[in-house]
Amino acid sequence: MTPIDMREPGSWITQAIVDFCAGPENNLQDGTGEPAWGQPLVAFSRGDDAIFIAFKEAVGPFHWTPREAFALAYPDEDVAPSDLTVISWVLPQTRLTKRDSRAETSMPPERWARSRIFGEAFNNKLRQAVVDVLGAEGVQAMAPMLMSQFKSHPSERFHIASTWSERHAAHASGLGTFGLCDGLITPVGKAMRVGSVIARLEVPPTARPYSDHHAYCLFYAKGTCGVCMERCPADAVTEAGHDKVKCSAHLAKTRAYVPEHYGFAGYGCGFCQTGVPCESGIPVGIEMGA
């Protein structure tokens, strides 16, 4: 790894993430070496971006701002929000995983279940690798999802919410907007997973080409589509939005199905992410910059 170029830290960090994802650890753990994820997207937001305060106000006092999360890892450091950058990435599902999922209607195909378990394990390795690479260059960094203090909370408004949201960090970094099913619609689609690291480093923020947090969803933007409602096997997606209770109940069923049929402890669903117009990109008919 070449030393970080402080003139172009964003490009250096992006390349480090792309390189790690091109390595052998990015695989479905099925004995073939097939990758779990395609090439990532990487973007950045400022730690003092007002959107993080808006998230906290919407979710609850337990939801971290970047500075609050960073302070858990570095409690003795006096760091201003403006000193921090949130590094966010999108890991797109592969063509084969999306193909398999489109063909199913109730239980996840093996590739999807593997991406949910082994692919997310790789995502954790990526989080730690970014922290380590930056640390080796003298840059303090931390991954909120790897903190022991990270947890979920009951929420009257959202049923359940957490101390940090990778999807919201990605939204803040200009990587996408939310759909009817709560999934994040990104330039490489909704069939993906996300990750983030917070660093004590100044990186120019990525522009957010939207002002509406639902800008890329055809249902909200145009009053059309709604295919994710049809795809959901639990009737958990309706015109009212995403019912997390029904969604969680269906996921519980997959926890029995996956080990019985595929031989490993796992679960998954993702039907609202595949077989929909936003599966692999921002859907046709959406004006960028809306």
Image: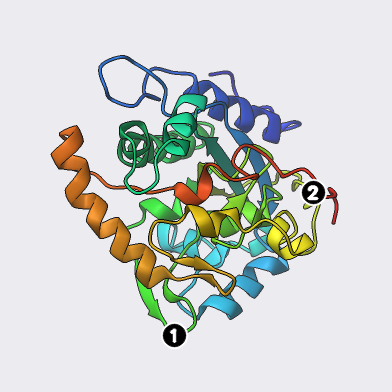
Tell me the kind of residue under disc 1.
Glu
The foreground one among 260 and 89 is 260
Where residue 56 appears, x then y in whole percent?
A: 57, 75
Q: Amino acid at mark 2?
A: Ala
Mark 2 and mark 1 lie on one chain; the one further toward the N terminus is 1
Is 243 rendered above or below residue 11?
below
Q: Which one is in front, 203 or 41?
A: 41
Image quarter of residue 76: bottom left
Q: For the residue carrying disc 1, how many other residues have a C-alpha within 10 Å: few (<14), some (14-19), or many (20+)?
A: few
* Category of crowding for the residue at label 2, using alpha-carbon neighbours closer than 10 angstroms: few (below 14), some (14–19), many (at least 20): few
Q: In what element is the residue under mark 1?
A: loop
Task: Please tell me which residue is depicted at 41% across the width and 69% down the height of the picture.
Answer: 244
Residue 43 locus on image (x, y percent): 67, 42
Identity of the residue drawn at 71% across and 69% down: 50
Residue 96 left/right relative to 171:
left
Q: Closer to the observer: label 2 or label 1? A: 1
Q: Is residue 85 visible?
A: no
Could you tell me if residue 275 is visible in this image? Answer: yes
Q: Evaluate if marks 2 and 1 touch, with contact meaning CB atoms under 8 Å apart.
A: no
According to the picture, the residue beneath numbered tag 2 turns out to be: 207
Tally of numbered tags: 2
What separation in Å lies between label 2 and label 1 (alpha carbons)?
32 Å
Q: Residue at x 85, y 57 (%)?
A: 290
Left of 34 or right of it: where is 217?
A: right
Q: Secondary structure at mark 2?
A: loop
Q: Which mark is residue 156?
A: 1
Relative to 191, 44 lies left or right: right
